[in-house]
Image (cartoon, grey):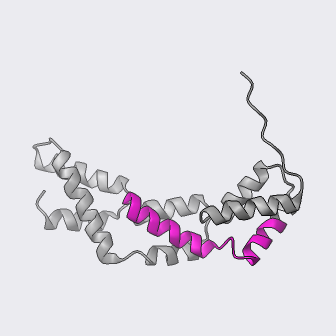
C-alpha cells in the first residue's frame, strides 16, 4: 500500500499564511510551529523568518501559550504542576515562562483537585491493608504530577 507523500511548501508567503492559520486555531509553542514548518520542507532561514513574523503579528506568544497549556492541563486533565512542567519543557518553553504559567494555577483549586483525585481513586481501590492502600494512593497522585509533600499532607488529613 502506497503512503501519499507529504506536500512540500516552497513559497515562504504561502507557508506564512498556513502557519498563521495553524497558530490561530490553537495556542502553539515556537517549537511546535518550527517542527511543522520543517515538516513542510522549508529551509532553516525561511523557518526563522516566518517565526519572527508570526511573533511580530501576535500569532505566536510563548508566555500566552505556557499559561494556556498550564491552565488547560490542570482544569481539563487534572494534572499536577510537576507533569505540567515536564510537558512545557518538552515543548521547549523557557524556565521563566514555566514558572509564570505555574503561578497562574490557584493554590486552593490545586489542593481541592488533588483531594478529589485521591478520593475518587480510594473508592476504586479494593486493597484492605492500610499501608498498601496509602502507598497506592500516593503513587497514583505522584503519577498525575502532584508534589509528594502535598500528597502526604492530604493523606494524613483524610483517613483513606
Q: Is residue 34 visible?
A: yes
* Residue plotted at (26% across, 69% down): 112
Residue 151, magenta (yes or no): no
The C terminus, quarter of image: bottom left
* Residue plotted at (68% across, 65% down): 30
Q: Is residue 116 left or right of residue 160?
A: right
- Give the magenta range: 49-78
Q: Is residue 82 above or below residue 134?
A: below
The N terminus, quarter of image: top right
* Residue plotted at (59% across, 63% down): 26
Count of all numbered marks drawn on residues in the image = 0
Estimate the x, y position of residue 106 in percent, counting from the top left.
Answer: 36, 77
Q: Is residue 29 visible?
A: no
Q: Is residue 2 above or below residue 104?
A: above
Q: Quadrant of residue 146?
A: bottom left
Q: Main secondary structure of the magenta part?
A: helix
Estimate the x, y position of residue 118 in percent, counting from the top left.
Answer: 23, 57
Amino acid at each position: 500500500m502506497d503512503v501519499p507523500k507529504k506536500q512540500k511548501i516552497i513559497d515562504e508567503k504561502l507557508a506564512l499564511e498556513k502557519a498563521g492559520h495553524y497558530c490561530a486555531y490553537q495556542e502553539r509553542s515556537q517549537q511546535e510551529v518550527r517542527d511543522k514548518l520543517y515538516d513542510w520542507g522549508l529551509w532553516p532561514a525561511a523557518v526563522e523568518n516566518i517565526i519572527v513574523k508570526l511573533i511580530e503579528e501576535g500569532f505566536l506568544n510563548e508566555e500566552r501559550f505556557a499559561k494556556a497549556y498550564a491552565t488547560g492541563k490542570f482544569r481539563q486533565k487534572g494534572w499536577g504542576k510537576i507533569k505540567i512542567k515536564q510537558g512545557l519543557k518538552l515543548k521547549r518553553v523557557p524556565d521563566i515562562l514555566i514558572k509564570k504559567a505555574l503561578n497562574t494555577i490557584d493554590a486552593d483549586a490545586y489542593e481541592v483537585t488533588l483531594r478529589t483525585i485521591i478520593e475518587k481513586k480510594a473508592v476504586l481501590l479494593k486493597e484492605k491493608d492500610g499501608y498498601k492502600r496509602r502507598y497506592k494512593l500516593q503513587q497514583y497522585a505522584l503519577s498525575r504530577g502532584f508534589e509528594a509533600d502535598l500528597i502526604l499532607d492530604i493523606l494524613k488529613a483524610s483517613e483513606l
